[in-house]
Amino acid sequence: MYVSITGLKPKSLFQAPRFWWHAIRSMQQAQRAPGNLSVEARTIAGTHHTMSLWEDRAAMRAYLAAGAHLGAMRASRSIGTGAVHGYESDAAPAWADLPALLRAHGRII
């Protein structure tokens, strides 16, 4: 299974509507995407996190590069700051571990 985690903090309250517009559309796309096993979002310490589980990396990459998510990636730098990390695993990480995983292994976006 491929695990994809993200954390994004909007730069200001003025960016929140754009963030939510992209986030909701991207979550809906992920829920329908071939190969998606699970997708969830939570806010931890003011940072909006997502965790999606995929059959494999190829399924995640197909989702990543199309539709609403592609638009969200293009807009992300103007909306906020954050990090992304993906890896193969037999189990999903605990939500409490996401911030530490992103600090240790995340690619800054």
Image (tube, helix red, strand yellow):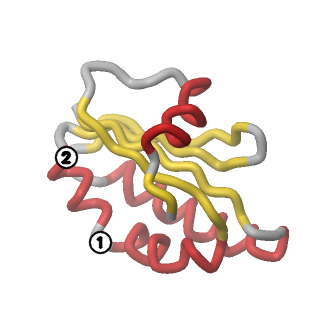
Residue 107: quadrant of the picture: bottom left
Q: Earlier in the sequence, mark 1 or mark 2?
A: 2
Point 19% across, 51% down: residue: 59
Q: Nearer the viewer, residue 29 or 77?
A: 77
Q: Secondary structure at mark 2?
A: helix
Q: Position of residue 73 (x, y in %)?
A: 45, 71
Residue 107 to residue 99: above or below: below
The amino acid pointed to by label 1 is: Ala
Residue 66 tag number: 1
**Residue 34 picture location, percent across and down:** 21, 50
Q: Quadrant of residue 37?
A: top left
Q: Is residue 15 left or right of residue 69?
A: right
Element type at mark 1: loop
Residue 31 badge:
none
Category of crowding for the residue at label 1, using alpha-carbon neighbours closer than 10 angstroms: few (below 14), some (14–19), many (at least 20): few
Q: Position of residue 69 (x, y in %)?
A: 41, 67
